[in-house]
Image (cartoon, grey):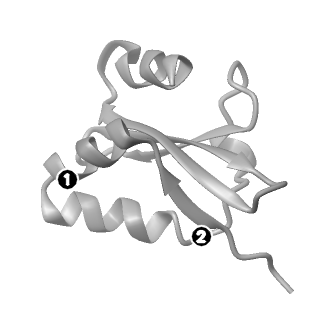
Amino acid sequence: MAVEYTAKWDPKALKELRKLDGAVRLKFLRRLEEPPRVPGDALHDLKDCYKINLRGAGYRLVYRVEDERIVILVLTIGRRARGFVHEQAEKR
């Protein structure tokens, strides 16, 4: 039986989500319902962090899996350009 994770949001990430177009927002929310540990999406320099890329829209979401709490903590959402999202995830 698969474990169900609950999504929790960094307050800044939630604000970023609300600014997105409805279709982009919905795509991210649907992807967060999938199993969280996708090996190809792991961010190797951030422990337990993974990404969701929406290439067509040009956005990336970064989240951290917290197994002990059965939580996916969404850290940041933004444009993929120049590593901005990655830098924000490191700070949060």
**What residue occupies the far bottom of the structure in this picture?**
1
Please, is residue 32 above or below residue 40 in the view?
Answer: below
**Left of 66 or right of it: where is 22?**
left
- In percent of width and height, residue 11 lies at 37, 42
6 with respect to 47 (left or right): left
Residue at figure coordinates x 62%, y 55% from the top left: 72
Nearest the eye: 12 or 76: 12
Cα separation between marks 1 and 2: 21 Å
The answer to which of 45 and 88 lies nearer the viewer is: 88
Picture residue at 19% right of the left edge, 65% below the top: 23
| Residue under label 1 | 18
Residue located beneath label 2 in the image: 34
- Above or below, 55 against 83 in this view is below
In the rendered structure, the answer to whether residue 31 lies left or right of residue 28 reads: right
Residue 24 image position (x, y, % from top left): 23, 58
Residue at horizontal 74 percent and vertical 49 percent from the top? 66
Around disc 2, counting alpha carbons within 10 Å, would you say few (fewer than 14), some (14 to 19), or many (20 or more)? Answer: few
Q: Is residue 3 above or below residue 92?
A: below
Image-based side of 58 in relation to 1, left or right: left
Quadrant of residue 2 within the rendered picture: bottom right
